[in-house]
Amino acid sequence: MIPDLKWMIGQSIKEIEKKDYTWFFRLDDGTVIGTEDSWRLVGAERIVMTSEDHGQQFGHDSPVDAADIVKAETKGKALTHAEVDMKTGDLTLSIASTSLTFLCLSSGYEAWRITHGDLEYICTGGGTVVDAGKGKTSEPVAPPDLQ
């Protein structure tokens, strides 16, 4: 079973917040995507911003605020597609010609988690996605070739 993320289509990014080492991306409907791992926003022609850029000076007068840039790039735009790469665990949200990807960069640590009401998906080490929603037994979501 591949995670069904169709309910995310039509939502917009409402808020982005960084607390300590965790990034929180909140959608209009209350969905929260949390990550301590890297993410990147890619525009039509290049990388626009990454979590690694946050707080960097880059020769500007003030450090980069990655949240402000992502909010400006996605403001008023609805998600058009959402999917998980079942081999790597990367989560990609498409917003017009822009994509926001939450990367899984560890074979051992969690990469990201989505919470939507009683629904919860967690990308565990190695890119395995687990359905950990209310009443679930945290079983891995099998890649298509293992169904």
Image: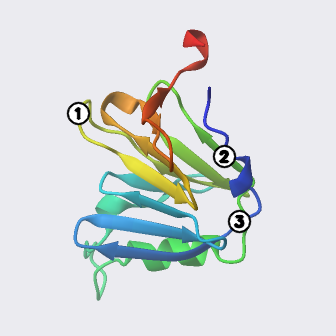
Label 1: how many residues lie within 10 Å, few (<14), some (14-19) or many (20+)? few
Asked whether the beta carbons under mark 1 and mark 2 sit within 8 Å of each other, the answer is no
Residue under label 1, please give it. Answer: 108
Q: Is residue 47 positioned above or below 107 on the image?
A: below
User: Residue 119 location, x and y as percent?
Assistant: 56, 52
Picture colour scheme? rainbow
Q: Amino acid type of disc 3?
A: Gln
Q: Residue at x 57, y 64 (%)?
A: 31
**Which x, y percent locates residue 106?**
27, 36
User: Dot 3 lies on which element?
Assistant: loop
Q: Indicate which disc, 1 or 3, sits on the residue closer to the N terminus.
A: 3
Q: Tell me the distance, in whole angstroms, between the alpha carbons under discs 3 and 2.
A: 11 Å
- Against 126, residue 46 (above or below) is below
Instruction: Quarter of the image for the C terminus: give it.
Output: top right
Q: Choose top left, top right, bottom left or bottom right for residue 140.
A: top left
Give the label on residue 5, or none. Answer: 2
Residue type pointed to by label 1: Gly
Circle 3 is placed at which residue position? 11
Q: Choose top left, top right, bottom left or bottom right for residue 122.
A: top left
Distance between the alpha carbons at the discs numbered 1 and 2: 24 Å
Residue 19: x and y in percent read: 29, 74
Residue displayed at 74% across by 56% down: 9
Q: Nearer the viewer, residue 99 or 43?
A: 99
Residue under the image location 41 percent in, 30 percent down? 128
Residue 92: x %, y % from top left: 56, 46
**Do the residues under discs 3 and 2 have CB atoms within 8 angstroms?**
no
Residue 60 figure quarter? bottom left
